[in-house]
Image (cartoon, helix red, strand yellow):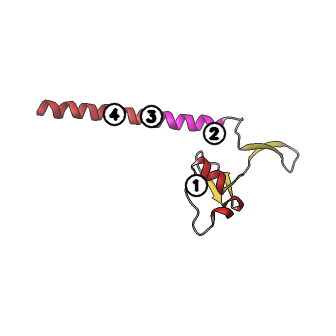
Amino acid sequence: MVATAIQLEKKEGFYKEQLKSYHTYLKTCLANIAARNKNVHQAWTKQGGGENAFSKQAIKYTAVKLMEKGVLLEVEDLPDSQQKNLLFEITPLATTGLLVMSG
């Protein structure tokens, strides 16, 4: 019984280390994605001084499209026939992985 408990503790330590490694990997991946110049949510814009710069653009989806993608589960108090008219605007924020959604 004691041997089993010791083995379980070793296994727990191994899995905690794996989880820590996985979180580090994910943070690195998100940072690399944010640092790329080829972000699908960015577009060239002219700023006041005539300089070209990247700015994040909002993406617009209908409720029907978000339901097809599995992002939106339901819309309360709105008939199915009207869901195609409901438009959601998703705007990425400066912090990687955060966004503002309005509809």
Mark 2 secondary-structure assignment? helix
Q: Dividing the picture into quarters, in which one does residue 42 lie?
A: top right
The magenta stretch spans which residues?
25-35
Q: Which residue, given by chain and number where applicable, does mark 3 sit on?
A: 22
- State the separation of the CA atoms marked 2 and 3: 18 Å
Q: Depth-wise, is mark 2 or mark 1 nearer the camera?
A: 1
Mark 1 secondary-structure assignment? loop
Disc 4 residue type? Tyr
Q: Name which residue lies at 56% across and 34% down.
A: 29
* Of 68 and 37, the residue lying toward us: 68
Quarter of the image with the C terminus is bottom right
Q: Which residue, given by chain and number where applicable, does mark 4 sit on?
A: 15
* Of 61 and 40, the residue lying toward us: 61
Q: Name which residue lies at 63% across and 57% down.
A: 101
Q: Which residue, given by chain and number where applicable, does mark 2 sit on?
A: 34
Main secondary structure found in the magenta portion: helix
In the displayed structure, would residue 78 be above or below residue 99? Answer: below
